[in-house]
Image (cartoon, rainbow, N blue to C red):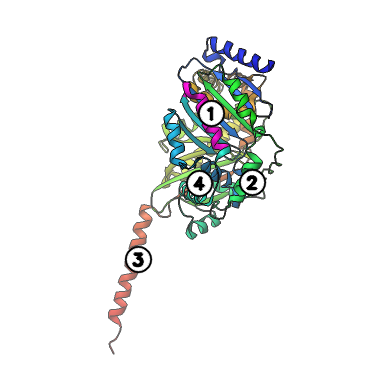
């Protein structure tokens, strides 16, 4: 009781204090007795709250065939809590002036709400009711399966399955991940998933000790007491053992041509390299190197040579592996030149390192960007959601400090480790170019003419 009173008083003091952009990293956070983690951030923006409920289960917790389970359950939890069904549930949220949605990622499932501050407790009540009072049945399951199937691109045809098995029609980074055994070879289907599996998922993973609730905005001073009574009443239980992340299973081809559409003269060039670990400030180092290479590619491929409109570098992660890539959309006829430019850029970095003046300018820009990168309650809530691993002792780590701490020497070391590798080249292009279609048509016409000529020369009976 004393602890709850102290938290209410602290929240009241925070509400009364002026809120500036500089203190967005300071957040009141504590666990309820059942293990549910709370993050409460009052701001100067009046009349609105942003709510994020995070459940620590995502697609990677399941085998490839069953990876749509958490996504399917996410949809089912919006299917209704009484006889009025999904429409009645949505009407209740509309009556409260709020909007909600949900997202299933590889590691978590997030329920996202924007609502008037005056109804924040009522909206949280409705969310809680959806989590614990939604009764699953076959009719709801069939409807949710149809929705998920449409979201995933429609019916999984035999032709698409064949293309996936050949691993030639995917986006370049995804194709490499599949080839290395880091991602599933086929799209997960939903038809075989059962109510028993979904109930087991909810019982095993939708536990308070596997949840984080983030509330940002014009907070009610009574919110801590309300959360203690409502969300604090959820029963904790032991969580299942997490599924180990996939490891790379073997080598992949150094170079592949991938099919992207039927007809066109465009092509996508992707040079993908494993991202090495560089020690302290690893994340910030690679973020700055990405900014540097974005600028270098833009300058060399667009400004100086006009080969690509918006070349870019990209960081991606699949299971336990991280990758860094150089990418450009070009004309088919310019593929060889664009690839030469990329490799020349890598050789220059290996020989000379990064340009000190450009590195310092881009580093200063990255640091300055932190002052305005997160604005408004919704962006703050999303920032906290994605940075939970950096939260400790009431504060998120300051990204500006991490960026400032990266030295030119560390960035050069990262570039050397990156480009000393051969990496993987993936080229995406349509099956036929314009000229290829022309010659195919000419060839078919020639065959037809030869056939007609042969018929005319055939002696009559």
The mark closer to the camera, 2 or 4, is 2
The mark closer to the camera, 4 or 1, is 1
Is the residue 429 above or below the residue 223 in the image? below
Residue in front for this viewpoint, 416 or 124: 124
Q: Earlier in the sequence, mark 4 or mark 3?
A: 4
Where residue 334 sits: x, y (%)?
A: 43, 44
Q: What range of the chain is rendered magenta?
A: 116-131
Q: CA distance from mark 1 to mark 3?
A: 66 Å
Callout 1 secondary element = helix
Q: Are marks 2 and 1 in contact (CB under 8 Å)?
A: no
Q: CA distance from mark 3 to mark 2?
A: 58 Å
Where's the N terminus, which quadrant? top right
The crowding category of the residue bearing disc 1, from other C-alpha atoms within 10 Å (few below 14, some 14 to 19, many at least 20), is many
The residue labelled by disc 2 is: 200
Q: Indicate left or right for 445 with 277 as reference.
A: left
Q: Indicate left or right for 351 with 305 as reference.
A: right
């Amino acid at each position: 009781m004393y602890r709850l009173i102290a938290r209410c008083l602290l929240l009241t003091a925070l509400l009364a204090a002026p809120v500036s952009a500089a203190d967005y990293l300071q957040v009141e956070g504590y666990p309820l007795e059942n293990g549910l983690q709370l993050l409460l951030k009052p701001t100067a923006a009046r009349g609105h709250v942003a709510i994020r409920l995070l459940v620590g289960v995502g697609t990677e917790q399941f085998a490839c065939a069953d990876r749509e389970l958490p996504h399917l359950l996410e949809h089912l939890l919006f299917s209704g809590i009484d006889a009025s069904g999904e429409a009645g549930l949505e009407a209740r949220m509309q009556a409260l002036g709020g909007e909600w949605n949900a997202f299933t990622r590889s590691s978590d499932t997030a329920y996202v709400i924007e609502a008037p501050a005056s109804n924040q407790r009522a909206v949280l009540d409705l969310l809680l009711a959806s989590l614990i009072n939604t009764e699953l049945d076959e009719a709801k399951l069939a409807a949710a399966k149809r929705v998920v199937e449409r979201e995933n691109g429609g019916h999984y045809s035999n032709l698409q399955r064949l293309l996936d098995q050949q691993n030639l029609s995917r986006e370049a980074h995804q194709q490499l991940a599949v080839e290395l055994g880091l991602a599933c070879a086929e799209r997960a289907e939903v038809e075989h998933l059962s109510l028993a599996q979904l109930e087991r998922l909810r019982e095993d993973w939708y536990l308070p000790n596997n949840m984080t609730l983030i509330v940002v905005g014009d907070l009610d001073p009574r919110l801590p007491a309300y959360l203690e009574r409502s969300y604090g009443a959820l029963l904790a239980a032991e969580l299942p053992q997490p599924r180990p992340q996939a490891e790379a299973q073997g080598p992949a081809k150094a170079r592949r041509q991938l099919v992207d559409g039927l007809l066109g003269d465009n092509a996508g060039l992707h040079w993908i390299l494993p991202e090495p670990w560089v020690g302290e400030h690893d994340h910030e180092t690679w973020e700055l190197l990405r900014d540097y290479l974005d600028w270098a590619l833009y300058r060399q491929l667009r400004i100086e040579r006009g080969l690509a409109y918006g070349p870019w570098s990209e960081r991606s992660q699949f299971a336990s592996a991280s990758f860094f890539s150089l990418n450009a959309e070009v004309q088919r006829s310019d593929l060889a030149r664009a690839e030469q430019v990329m490799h020349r850029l890598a050789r220059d970095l290996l020989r000379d390192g990064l340009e000190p003046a450009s590195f310092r300018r881009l580093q200063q820009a990255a640091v300055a960007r932190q002052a305005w990168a997160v604005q408004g309650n919704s962006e703050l809530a999303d920032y906290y959601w994605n940075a939970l691993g950096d939260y400790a002792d009431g504060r998120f780590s300051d990204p500006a400090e991490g960026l400032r701490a990266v030295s030119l020497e560390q960035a050069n070391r990262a570039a050397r480790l990156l480009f000393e590798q051969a990496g993987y080249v993936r080229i995406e292009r349509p099956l036929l170019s314009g000229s290829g279609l022309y010659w195919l048509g000419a060839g078919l016409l020639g065959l037809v003419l030869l056939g007609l000529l042969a018929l005319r020369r055939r002696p009559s009976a």
